[in-house]
Amino acid sequence: MPAPEKALRRDHISPADAKYRLDRKYLLGAIDVAAYPVPSTREQRAAMYHIVLPIAVAAACRAKAVWSARRGRRRLVALLLACSLAACSTPQIDVPTARAQSATSALSVADLTAQLPLSGGITMSNAALARDFMELTFFLESGRALPRFTRFEGPVTVRIAGAAPANAGPDLARLVSRLRSEAGIDISVVTTAKSAITIEFVPKRQIKAQVPNAACFVVPNVTGWKDYRRAGRRANSDWTQLATRSHAAVFIPSDAAPQEVRDCLHEEISQALGPLNDLYRLPDSIWNDDNFHTVLTGYDMTMLRAYYAPELHSGLSPDEVFSRLPAIFARINPAGNSGGVLPPAGATPRAFVTAIEQALGPNATPARRRTAAFRAVQIATDHGWRDTRAGFAWFVLGRLSVRDAPEAALNAFVQAAAIYRATPGARIHAAHVDMQLAAFALANGRAEDAMALVNRSLDVAVTAENPAMMATLYMIRAEALQSLGHAAEARRARLDSGAWARYGFGSDAAVRKRSAEVAALANIDARQN
């Protein structure tokens, strides 16, 4: 995945030439439960519960609230959570009366979750796949154009070097098996001293010293870490100068959590093999800067199968590739021949990318990061987007508002949920929003709502193969069950969480820390009563 265009040391390869996966702590992909405020004074409690209804939620749910000074604040929290549970996704809803609002707040969990399901999957038209292929293939994330098509020609070998974690070998084997069966690539793991792709495990501190924001990255025409350090800015390590791909090196922290290692393997090996760009508008792809997808999807495998189609070879111009894509996609995606869906694209302006990068970057104050997130939301609104770009802008704003402006955070999450749940292919995105809303529900003493949000997200997290997310959802479920007096079921949920947490978070200490943070959320409401 790409990182913000931060300058590296002068003697090393620029971010435009190396492909990155951003560190998860910058992407805010997991719930930051520690950020949810624990109110200690009457004024802080009032601020926590004084949730106003801004334009964002009015546009999503068209609900106008009437509340008393005290009891109604909780009623409005319930109304907003009800809006998200009902997944209201269109602005054409009548404004409810005060009586209707009370009825909405009293709806059962089953009623709330049944009203609007997630948008189902779609069959993309081959025209849409060809359009995406060209944008993914012939541009870098920096916007620089690639003059020619490049790929590995012939069998591709992969080897592991350095102090590899225990899960690296098995996870690589599973990935290679998928690439062979789903993408049709002739790729295999070897134990020889040389290979087409070298995966070298390096201590995280060394990677951070070179590329501060990156969790992992890939560089062409280098054979390992020492070679990368010597490479400087030599032309053959610039993606735009390649005539073909002969070898590349992927660098992953040796001390990363098992899931981070697996995620890096999927993204960096796939981009060593194929497309080099990432697009915010792709809902069902690992090649999206939002990092919601952690493993290669069916869409990604279709693109890689096209990348290694016999009709293509290194050295072709963009026009030559484009002319061959209709026949390629007609063969590998026959369902797309009947039309399918051609979602609107529209170029993503650099100003939006810059705003998101500034919002997620580590070098700005919280206020400046929130300002950047507001700017991204405004750009999305000005362009009329209702796709994953707009959803991500709202999601980032919500994540950055939790600590200092919980009312704004809740409203942003509801808006993101409305967009994601109406977007085909964005099930995992909607589930991430549900996880955030479940934290709000738990902190507000609404255990049933927290359970409903968790329950509809778990299957999505399982399908997306996201153990860290699954573990956190089970932790929230455990605390909700405990607060409802179901101690035995809460213990089972904690056991379920433990089965995934070690893989997702990497160490017992990290698991205990996350568990304690989620437990603290459940205690917020208890301290107020």
Image (cartoon, helix red, strand yellow):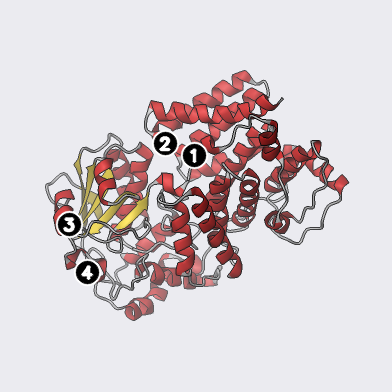
Q: Nearer the viewer, residue 518 or 275?
A: 518
Mark 3 residue crowding within 10 angstroms, few (<14) / some (14–19) / many (20+): many
- Give how far apart the Cα atoms at labels 2 and 4 are: 36 Å
Question: Which residue: 29% across, 44% down?
Answer: 172
| Residue extending farthest left | 193
Q: Position of residue 473 (x, y in %)?
A: 54, 35
For this view, does 289 lie left or right of residue 120? left
Q: Amino acid at mark 4?
A: Leu
Q: Nearer the viewer, residue 323 or 354?
A: 354
- Give how far apart the Cα atoms at labels 2 and 1 are: 8 Å
Pointer 3 or 4: first along the chain: 3
Placement of 115 over or under 283, stated as above or below? above
| Disc 1 target residue | 469
- Where the C terminus falls, by quadrant? top right
For this view, does 307 lie left or right of residue 457? left
Question: Which residue: 33% across, 73% down?
Answer: 145
Pointer 2 or 4: first along the chain: 4
Pointer 3 or 2: first along the chain: 3
Question: Which residue: 58% across, 70% down?
Answer: 383
| Disc 2 target residue | 504
Q: Position of residue 243 (x, y in %)?
A: 21, 71
CB of mark 2 within 8 Å of CB of mark 1?
yes
Q: Amino acid at mark 1?
A: Met
Pointer 1 or 3: first along the chain: 3
| Disc 4 target residue | 242
- Give how far apart the Cα atoms at labels 3 and 4 are: 13 Å
Mark 2 residue crowding within 10 angstroms, few (<14) / some (14–19) / many (20+): many
| Disc 3 target residue | 222
